[in-house]
């Protein structure tokens, strides 16, 4: 049975292996679990709220219409990371048997009213269409943002992906040397000089306009554990909360969990995307297994 629909979630199961599956909570259309032959690929806090009382801490939360907090007119009162991750999406159904593929939608009718009203005073007609495809060794999440309004509006998009690692101390992220980075902790912009990103404290960086030809890889002890392909997502946020930030998040458990995760977050966040009436914008991330280290020059 390639798809199991429950009242609060949908589970896609690979016809190739019953232990390759992905679970999507309708709240936030949040991927909360993705296994390849039984091995969990994502990190989920053991204290993550899955009851719709707050955005899920882990998996793949969806960030729209704003990344972080913004002082821009029409965005300043939105909650951090917008309202897509704390609204209940509609499950539209399975669109493909193999590889199992499902679609979810959000529009003003389903959006969290309090938060939606904080975006341009709740005046923007929009449709979000999320497509999730489960292949034997990869997961593809695709978003289509459509302006169904008679006026233009603007937005950010980001997949806030929490990838599982065995130990952050052994983890590197490659192919970012030479890229321009805004360091959220230093409030500084600089060119990345390190041959690979390593982690020995809180790290919160927005790499801007990174060519989508660049494959991002999470490497542990010389082995690739995750490959991340991006389509139409020029920016990449890399985040690990480390000790203090983890301690300050009630839903981040265990407190040592930062050793088991790294956020690699493809998005369009360095500026807003503007959609004219009737226009749509489509982007996707493909997270896949794969052993070969692929070093790409600047
Ligand atoms: O993506 C990194 C980030 O913007 C960090 O600054 C941190 O705030 C993280 O998102 C988690 O945000 P949240 O609102 O989910 O606690």
Image (spheres, rainbow, N blue to C red):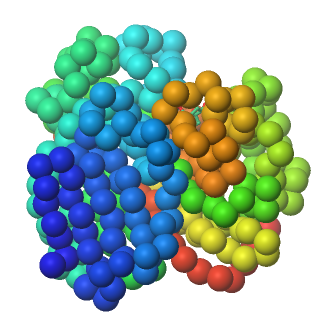
Asked whether, in this view, residue 8 is left or right of residue 135, the answer is left
Determine which quarter of the picture holds residue 19: bottom left
Residue 36 screen position, x and y as percent: 44, 76
The quadrant holding residue 107 is: top left
Q: Nearer the viewer, residue 67 or 170?
A: 170
Residue at 40% across / 11% down in the picture?
Answer: 77
Instruction: Confirm whether residue 246 shows in the render.
Output: yes
**Residue at position x 18%, y 47% from top?**
8
Q: Residue at x 86, y 60 (%)?
A: 195
Q: Is residue 275 left or right of residue 129?
A: right
Q: In the rendered view, tell whether residue 59 sits above or below residue 94.
A: above
Nearest the camera: 231 or 33?
Answer: 33
> Which quadrant: the N terminus?
bottom left
Which quadrant of the structure image shows residue 102?
Answer: bottom left
With 294 as the anchor, is 274 left or right in this view? left
Work out whether residue 237 can be spotted: no
At a point 44% along the width and 12% down the height, the residue shown is 76
Horizontal side of residue 189 vs 64, given as left or right: right
Nearest the eye: 211 or 119 = 119
Front in this rendered view, residue 253 or 170: 253
**Across the whole image, how many numbered discs are drawn on residues?**
0
Where 239 falls versus 298 (above or below)? above
Outermost residue, bottom side: 16
Residue 162 appears at what percent x and percent y? Answer: 53, 51
Q: Position of residue 18 (x, y in %)?
A: 30, 81
Query: Residue 283, position in %: x, y?
Result: 40, 54
Q: In what quadrant of the picture does the C terminus appear?
A: bottom right
In terms of image quarters, where does ligand 1 lie? top right
């Amino acid at each position: 049975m390639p798809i199991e629909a429950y009242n609060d979630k949908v589970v896609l199961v690979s016809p190739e292996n019953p232990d390759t599956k992905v679970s999507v909570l309708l709240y936030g259309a949040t991927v909360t679990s993705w296994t390849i032959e039984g091995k969990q690929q994502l990190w989920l806090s053991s204290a993550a709220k899955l009851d719709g009382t707050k955005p899920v801490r882990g998996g793949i939360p969806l960030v729209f219409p704003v990344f972080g907090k913004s002082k821009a007119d029409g965005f300043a009162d939105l909650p951090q990371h917008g309202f897509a991750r704390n609204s209940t999406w509609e499950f539209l159904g399975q669109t493909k048997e193999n590889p199992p593929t499902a679609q979810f939608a959000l529009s003003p009718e389903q959006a969290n009213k309090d938060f939606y009203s904080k975006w341009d005073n709740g005046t923007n007609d929009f449709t979000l269409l999320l497509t999730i495809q489960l292949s034997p060794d990869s997961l593809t999440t695709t978003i289509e943002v459509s302006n169904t309004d008679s006026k233009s509006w603007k937005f950010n998009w980001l997949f806030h992906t929490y990838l599982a690692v065995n130990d952050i101390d052994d983890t590197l992220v490659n192919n970012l040397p030479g890229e321009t980075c805004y360091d959220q902790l230093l409030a500084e912009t600089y060119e990345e000089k390190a041959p690979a990103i390593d982690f020995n404290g809180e790290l919160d960086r927005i790499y801007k306009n990174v060519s989508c030809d660049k494959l991002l890889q999470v490497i542990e002890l010389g082995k690739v554990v995750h490959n991340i392909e991006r389509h139409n997502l020029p920016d990449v946020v890399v985040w690990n909360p480390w000790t203090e930030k983890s301690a300050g998040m009630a839903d981040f458990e265990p407190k040592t969990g930062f050793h088991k995760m790294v956020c690699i977050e493809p998005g369009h966040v360095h500026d807003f995307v503007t959609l004219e009436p009737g226009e749509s914008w489509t982007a996707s991330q493909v997270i896949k297994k794969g052993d070969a280290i692929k070093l790409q020059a600047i």
